[in-house]
Amino acid sequence: MKNAYIATYPPRQCGIGTFTQNLFNSMIASKENDSDDRNSFIVAMDDPNEKLTYPEEVKLTIRQEVQEDYRAAAKYINVSGADSCILQHEFGIFGGQDGVYILPLLHELEIPLIVTLHTVMQNPSNNQREVLQTICRMANRVVVMSHKAIEMLVDIYEIPRNKIAYIEHGVPDIQYDQEKVKTEFKLDNRKVLLTFGFVGRNKGIESAIKALPKVVEKHPELVYIVLGKTHPNVIKHVGEEYRLSLIQLIEDLHLEKNVILINEFTTQKQLFKYLYASDIYITPYLNEAQITSGTLSYAVGVGSAVISTPYWHATELLSEGRGVLIDFGNTDQLSDALIDLLDHPEKRVEIRRRAREHGLKITWPKIGKIYNEVVEEVVEEKVKIENKEEAPFDISLLPEFSMKQIRRLTDDTGIIQHAIFGIPNLKEGYCLCDNSRALLLALMSYRIKKDKSSLKLIPVYLSYIHYMQNEDGNFRNFLSFSRQYLDEVGSEDSFGRTIWAIGYLLNYPPNNSYCQIGQLIFDKAKPHFDNLQSIRSIANTIIGISYYLRNNMSDDAMIEKLRELTYKLIDHYNINNHDGWHWYEALLAYDNAILPLAMLHATSILNEEKIRKVAFKTMDFLVDHTMKDGYLSIIGNEEWFMKDGERSVFAQQPVDAMGMVLMFRQAYNITGDKSYLTKLYKSFRWFLGENDLRISLYNHDTQGCCDGIESYGINQNQGAESTIAYLVSYLNVLKAHEDYYRKDKRIKKQENYDSKTIFR
């Protein structure tokens, strides 16, 4: 097999780079007769602060903070002829927040992916969890080096256990004679303690030094070697502060003759000489959160007598008598353990024997063979499922769903309609349109995400709608921040959007109380259905009535009202439908998708061919003018798009993208045609950067959505309408994905039943 490896790589001084080099060589060595395997190559994560000369197996480098390099690497790998990609993952070696830049590369890979995790956090930040979950979802196999990591991946990150492979950290098959290397290092007649690896405060080296005076008093010949450079990230932030503190501690304890700090990143061969020269190896880490330790694996691999604190990897690797565990930071325990092993060489010999016995099982040639077997498995699995119909989108690539900006904009009156950047603009007050949309969002969030915090928002928006309803059943729209009415009667658009939200509430009521007030508002507004003139108000009202009827199909009068309103739209369509212009008016303006969306909803209730035909004809017309270049390009609100004129590109609004998402979801619900799901996801990606400017409108810091695409760039204000549009679209992507898989399971179940029936 030909493999592409993504990781740091020597000469970059990095433990993961050394791991990758060993893995690369061992996988090739275990398949000497496979010419393809010898053509495997490295894509190296480059350190921007160093000019490195890589060996010939490195065919491409990625500059850590340059996003374009990641996509270029994906393209290179895809055309390289590689059978699989093997990624070494550690948050700090990839660009972006928590290494998020690696995600687009992995998403664009067309070959199986094996990911080795060098860190699994027990208490990740939301972003760290999202990044790691996304990587694991995209991976065909996730490799970890401890059983604790498997437990955390399953319980915390919800990764399927059958996707996880347990492969221990490899150990180079290098052997030296202890006495000879002691002589080489001029350590004859010395008892040698050793710790190696990058130096940092979490390594607990000061604890080991503090334990030494008691030991040196009995064994003055003892020497403790700390081999390793200060970690580059430590130097970047605080310089050599920690190493200097260790030097001071050594002086304070008068241990200058017994402690040696060697500040270098040594070669592997030199490192193993030190390991063989040591009598006892120490890893005095300060906390348990260490899922993998290459240094500990090396020490066990060569058969060292190890004393360690009980961090996760040590607890597993040193079990069955392969080492001694002491409590975190307990210098007295460490002193006693050291004295015990130095005083009783037979105990050291037994620990070394057990460790070496285990070490022989994890040499790199054997680990390389296991990795090759994993690669063969996933490649074979890919061949088996190559013709399997896959979901048309990958929800693992979505940002985390968050209502943070909505809650920021909401007070006890309702949702503030505008924002200055991410901050509520109180001077603009409230409007019915946005509170109705916010009610719709909160209802969807509670229904789809089971988000109980959304349940608390529903009465806020519902009470605003109730407060703005006049005695005659119509609605006011605007309210100042000081709660003063700013109009007598709102727009027809605000009326229609309110009926949509109330209709949705009546179809999916979270409780009976909300249902009752929703019914009261709906009944009071019904007399105004006949007076609507705006086609978008009619469309919004059709959607609201359609939701209402799904739970009230015995309401014949409302079914007839739905038919009347639907044919009003068809009348508009018939007037304007000529010369290839299949639309409801002589221009494409704002919130265009709401019109075919309404017809699709009416189709699902009334089931009339004429309605269905107009719905799909106008939907296709809109798609032709907004998605012909392979991504969603919304009709701009600057000048819109007049028939026989030039379409406006800028002042694109998020609410238009939301309409497209909802339209395609409803089309899929009616037809079951998967192509509509592909278009749905493509429309949603407008928010995330697949648009005319190739800039994301979603703000990861505020979790709000920017107000639109302008000629100068992105409008960075994040008002209610825009953020609601993003979140409603997001929820519909999730629901469409859920519906797709539910339908797929039903089909498989039916096919299975049919096949059993046939064979009976």
Image: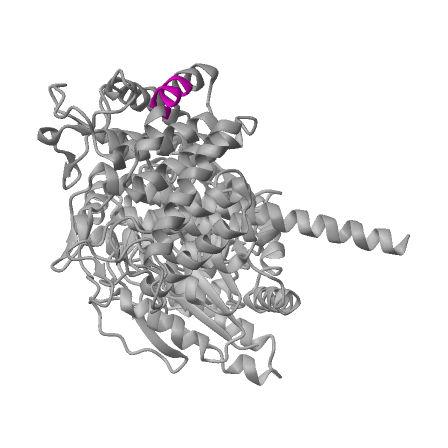
Residue in the picture at 33% in, 24% down:
457
Residue in the picture at 41% in, 67% down:
6
Q: According to the image, what is the colour scheme of the structure?
A: one colour
Q: Position of residue 502 (x, y in %)?
A: 38, 27
Hey, which quadrant is residue 75 in on the image?
Answer: bottom left
Asked whether 592 or 228 is in front, the reply is 592
Q: Image height check: is 286 above or below 80?
A: above
Asked whether 618 or 115 is in front, the reply is 618
Left or right of 209: which side holds 557?
right
Q: Is residue 13 something that shows in the picture?
A: yes
Q: Position of residue 633 (x, y in %)?
A: 29, 61
Q: Is residue 153 magenta?
A: no
Dominant SS of magenta comes to helix
- Which residues are the magenta region? 518-526
Asked whether 191 or 151 is in front, the reply is 151
Hey, which quadrant is residue 469 in on the image?
Answer: top left
Asked whether 595 or 161 is in front, the reply is 595
Residue in the picture at 23% in, 68% down:
644
Task: Give the farthest residue toward the left.
Answer: 427
Task: Give the farthest residue toward the right.
Answer: 760
Q: Position of residue 420 (x, y in %)?
A: 12, 39
Q: Image height check: is 552 above or below 387?
A: above
Could you tell me which quadrant the N terminus lies in?
Answer: bottom right
Residue in the picture at 25% in, 50% down:
590
Left or right of 596: which side holds 604?
right
Q: Position of residue 518 (x, y in %)?
A: 39, 21
Q: Is residue 293 something that shows in the picture?
A: no
Left or right of 162: which side holds 722?
left
Q: Image height check: is 203 above or below 211?
A: below
Across the whole image, how many numbered discs are drawn on residues?
Answer: 0
